[in-house]
Amino acid sequence: MRIRLYLAALSLVGGAGAAAVSAPPASAAACSDLDVVAARGTFEPGTLGLIVGDPVYSALQKKITGRSLTSYKVNYPADLSLTSAAQGNADLVNHVNSQAAACPNQRFILVGYSQGANVVDNSIGISSAGAVVGSPIVATIPAALESRVAAVLLFGNPIRAIGKSVTGTYQSRTIDFCAKGDPVCEAGGNDTLAHLGYTANADAAATFAAGKV
């Protein structure tokens, strides 16, 4: 039922602006070697995200051996409200800042699917304004912490449909999956079901991340 709602929502989404948003203070989690910070897609069920976050985290646990992993589900509505992606952007950056301060040796793997990819894009300084369920940037990971982001894993990234991609500092550490025909990330795409197939890319994403840590 929730997947059907998710499909219905995809047919209705449009670009969204956002007002200024602040996130509540984050509390630090355990000081693992790697913290996997996942932003789910619009209305996506699951712990970190049924389609992407959960299978990617499971694949990372298998691919990255000899190091401890923790996970964090970005706290944001993941709905169609005008400030949804902005709230996620603020929370992700707040979490990374808090963890980095508490755990000086911890590194991060950022995971974003659909609207969650907008959240990650904004957080690394690539604006998703004008994209489906996008928003202007409200916070970015500080330059001093950029080297601690080991990998950025994006799926169904809406900025690709408006001709944008991750460039600059994070480009070499980013893998960005867009399924053929996915209307969320491919301009003119008409295969809505393609947007739900990114579980198939979990292993490839984990392999990429393992090569960066």
Image (spheres, rainbow, N blue to C red):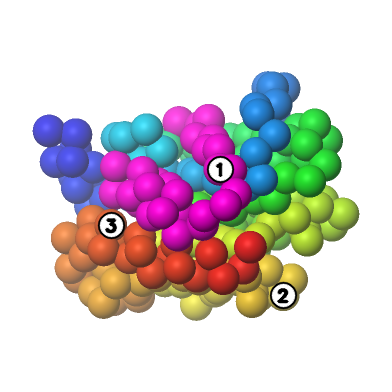
- The magenta segment is 50-77
Q: Are marks 3 and 2 in contact (CB under 8 Å)?
A: no
Along the viewing direction, whichever of 68 and 46 lies nearer the viewer:
68
Pointer 2: what residue? 168
Q: Is residue 202 visible?
A: yes
Other residues around mark 1 within 10 Å, as few (<14) / some (14–19) / many (≥20)? many
Q: Amino acid at mark 3?
A: Thr
Q: Nearer the viewer, residue 66 or 79?
A: 66
Pick the quarter of the image with the C terminus.
Answer: bottom right
Displayed quadrant of residue 29: top right
Sequence-first disc among 3 and 1:
1
Residue 65: in magenta span: yes
Which quadrant of the figure has residue 86? top right
Pointer 1 with pointer 2, Cβ within 8 A: no
Query: What residue is at 23 percent from the left and 42 percent from the top?
Result: 6
Picture quadrant where residue 18 is located: top right
Please name the amino acid that badge 2 sits on. Gly
Give the Cα separation between the discs numbered 3 and 1. 20 Å
Q: Is residue 199 left or right of residue 27?
A: left
Q: Which residue is mark 1?
A: 69
Q: Amino acid at mark 1?
A: Leu
- Tell me where residue 196 appears, x and y as whole percent: 23, 56
What whole-number distance in Å separates the C-alpha atoms at marks 1 and 2?
A: 27 Å
* Helix, strand or loop for disc 3: helix
Residue beneath disc 3: 199
Q: Is residue 113 in view? A: no
**Mark positioned earlier in the residue sequence (1 or 2):** 1
